[in-house]
Image (tube, coloured by chain):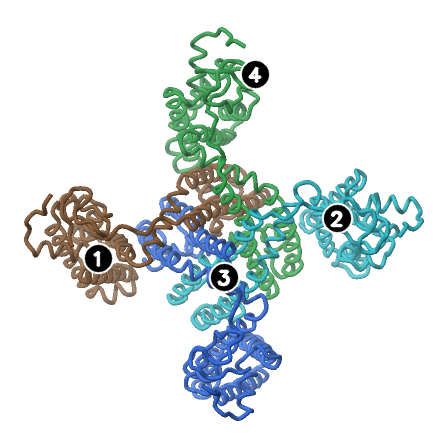
Chain colours: A brown, B green, C cyan, D blue
């Protein structure tokens, strides 16, 4: 199927904004990521009351500057993609929209603009840049190893959940009356998770002898079962190493029509919708 | 040995209640697990005093509803199995009974109904459903890897126990007089376990210089020896991966006469007692 | 070399007390270990002031009973071994002596009898019993894997020590003035170890922004480098599994003349001194 | 290229000071490391106010003794190396200078002499001595395994950073108003790191039900993802073991002209600049 006739500007824009395999496209992505990182940092710093009180005007200006910039970028993305609704409904399309909405909503309802931290999710695009070079295989190996251990990890986590529910309930019965920290079962389960994962805040600790004895058992149990997920994932990484996946055969190109990625380096037409790809 | 003549209702009931390889049997198990989960959640929430005070009537109704439901289910199980005593004496039979008793005992002795949390143990049946599909092998691999490392983990835990007894005693001698947290040896051993497993509550911490120096040694020791169980279990998982066990050759069918599981998919008669299996 | 003529009683005693491969020898070891465990438990419980105040008389009787029993055992060991000085100077000989001395010294100097906890070291004999059956290989595999990783673990721990010294010093410079918890460098290094090993008591925590930022870096570093000892030991366990050591070829027999162990099952004479072994 | 004519003293000094493969050179390195270790210990102990007040005179003498000694050593290093500027600009040259400067600067500006702790970095030379014997391969294996996992660890840490930013921000929104510990987003991110790495100080803990529920999720997440770096590094160690690197083919000799190391045992001339090496 031949490529549809299109305005060169839109074609050019698509290549720069959506792709990362041309110098301009890569530069755009790097600048965008930097701006996102800075805007997230600004939201973070604004939450520090000392800074907020002193520089409230500056924060207001910065917030609106970033929001307007990202709004423009969002509109450009909608303009240069063939099926704007498809993009708007995709994961990144939704994140891009949610990253600008809180400022506007903040005009109507105050206090909502901290939701701007959702912008951090936009940083996930960093993996698009990582895709190039040798980070591609590194990321791929991790994801493959985790996917391969999914079933085992699920069974393991189910067992862990069952254990903490039972341990938490038992500790509530043991400590409940004498220790106001264990005042109800959900709190005791929270304690069981804090202990089993070896986090150990110390905000809730057993005070009775039996409680401390049971806690010690839970800790040793936690110490022993941490070996299980580690063993599962290690085995996957080792099996990955001894039979590595074939070399990466996809580029970072995304089709302008259907928006899907995963095309081979020598692909001329999109393998999902038959449209011509950018060169 | 030919199958004994039996009421079709009992046969049907057995298939639905005890097995999970027919649509009806699976549906029954899923609904049952949901009900158990909800009833456990209700017991948990009831322990929160705010909720207990406000909705005490609702909690009472829910508790009795679940108890009556589970009592009916227990009676049905007794009815449709050939050897009720064998079922009643098995692990799940006892758990099923213990899951309803606390409510009835609560009529005589108050305060015992929190023991209902034992119902969570009934959720172990979830592994019956897991047995189907690819969770079967996942769970099997974990259990096989743990079983294979049992001897090594036992030796390791014995060594850990000996270490914490000695460390705890030494710390009692070092900190005992100056730090009321280390007021006796069992408490010092509790501290040693909290430290060695890297839980680190902070409810008991050394205050003398020597005590802090010894603690630092214990922590580094704990950091180093966590590698041992992990290494043991990893090695088992890897050896599992390189020589995987044969494909699962058992179904979730349980014999109605002797109650035992582990039958091959093509089995027509129980391999333990010779009775005919459900189709 | 023919066996020297010896009183049958001494020969019999040696077999029972020092060896664990006859029914009587095994029974003696099991009873002895139980007595040691109970005597350690008694010392522990005596340190609990509530129990000490109420049952001080009972504790006194128990302490003296155990001490007299272990003294008798020690004398018997000296009697039935050919070279008493060699035994008395060996590791277990010293531990056996240290396990009874504190009670006698306690007659002269009060407060020393808590040193009796050293008796716990006598429990190390448990590995003699473990030697039999399949625990032998389990313990051997762990020890071999740890020995094989000794050099790597040493280098790793050196690097960790260097890291905590530098991190501790930097944190002292950063937090020192503003946070009395970081009042000197040794204390800051103690904090660094608590943090790097993910124990995290919380008795010393950073309060300045820079301090918290540095702490976060230390934690992520600790999270990453825990992988190193685990990886080292895992690799050893896996290499053990793929080329397991030959089957155990030594018994638990110890020569009555030179006291050394490690004899082959078919050995009739001691391979170190040429004396005849017990049958 | 023939070796340039040189004063035998300078040649001898270079061999002793810069190299570790002659008895004199090794002895010099061992003594130097001991002196550095002691001087670092002195700086540490000086920071303890009790000791500082009592022995301030002794500390002053020790500090100046070590500084003068290390200054002499620094000057000798400059004298016996061919290109003093090259050494002065190298990592160890800078560390050697920074290790003496704080004492002199302390004459002008008080309070700076704690910067002497930077001397600990000089202890990195210990790996020069480690290079000999079987520690060489141990250290090499660790470094190679870490280098091989660099890309994967980078991707993993990026993902962890993204996770803690998002979790920290969400927890600020959830706990912010009700819990003064979560007073701003950077502090909440600090909490997220403390929790995810299972350090768990307990200086900041959630108090609301939703906050505790989210924390529990974070802990279980942290428990699961610790498996990732461990798996990555384990896989590298195992692949190292099954195909070990060739035997060490470099000595600890460093060229006197260009200062670079990594020469083969049979090398007579420096492979980087063609100058003759010490024998």
Q: Which mark is residue D245?
A: 3
Q: Are marks 3 and 2 on the same chain?
A: no
**Residue behind mark 1:** A20
Mark 4 secondary-structure assignment: loop
Q: Residues within 10 Å of mark 3 (few under 14, many from 20)?
A: few
**Residue behind mark 4:** B273
Q: Position of residue B93 (x, y in %)?
A: 53, 23
Q: Nearer the viewer, residue D84 or B89?
A: D84
Disc 3 is attached to a residue of which chain? Answer: D
Q: Are marks 4 and 3 on the same chain?
A: no
Q: Nearer the viewer, residue C79 or A191?
A: C79
**Residue behind mark 2:** C56
Q: Position of residue A182 (x, y in %)?
A: 48, 43
Q: How far apart, in angstroms, are the residues tagged by discs 3 and 2?
A: 65 Å
Q: Position of residue C255 (x, y in %)?
A: 82, 51
Quadrant placement of the N terminus of chain B: top right
Q: How far apart, in angstroms, are the residues tagged by discs 4 and 3?
A: 59 Å
Disc 1 is attached to a residue of which chain? Answer: A
Is residue C129 toward the left or the right of residue D158 in the image?
A: right
Q: How far apart, in angstroms, are the residues tagged by discs 1 and 4?
A: 68 Å
Mark 2 secondary-structure assignment: helix
């Amino acid at each position: 199927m031949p490529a549809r006739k299109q305005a060169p500007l839109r074609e050019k824009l698509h290549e720069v904004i959506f792709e990362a395999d041309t110098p301009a496209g890569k530069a755009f992505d790097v600048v965008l990521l930097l701006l996102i990182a800075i805007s997230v940092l600004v939201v973070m710093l604004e939450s520090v009351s000392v800074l907020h009180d002193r520089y409230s005007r500056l924060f207001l200006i910065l917030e609106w500057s970033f929001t307007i910039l990202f709004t423009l970028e969002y509109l450009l993305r909608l303009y240069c993609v063939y099926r704007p609704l498809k993009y708007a409904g995709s994961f990144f399309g939704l994140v891009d929209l949610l990253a600008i909405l809180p400022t506007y909503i903040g005009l109507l309802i105050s206090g909502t603009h901290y939701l701007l931290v959702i912008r951090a999710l936009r940083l996930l695009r960093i993996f698009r840049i990582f895709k190039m070079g040798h980070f591609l295989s590194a990321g791929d190996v991790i994801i493959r190893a985790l996917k391969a251990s999914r079933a085992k990890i699920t069974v393991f986590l189910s067992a862990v959940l069952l254990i903490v529910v039972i341990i938490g309930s038992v500790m509530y019965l043991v400590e409940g009356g004498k220790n106001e920290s264990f005042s109800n079962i959900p709190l005791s389960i929270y304690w069981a998770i804090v202990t089993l994962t070896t986090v150990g805040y110390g905000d809730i600790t057993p005070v009775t002898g039996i409680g401390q004895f049971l806690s010690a058992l839970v800790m040793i149990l936690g110490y022993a079962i941490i070996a299980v997920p580690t063993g599962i994932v290690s085995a996957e990484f080792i099996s990955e190493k001894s039979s590595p996946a074939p070399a990466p055969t996809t580029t970072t190109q995304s089709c302008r029509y259907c928006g899907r990625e995963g095309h081979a380096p020598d692909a001329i037409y999109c393998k999902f919708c038959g449209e011509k790809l950018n060169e």
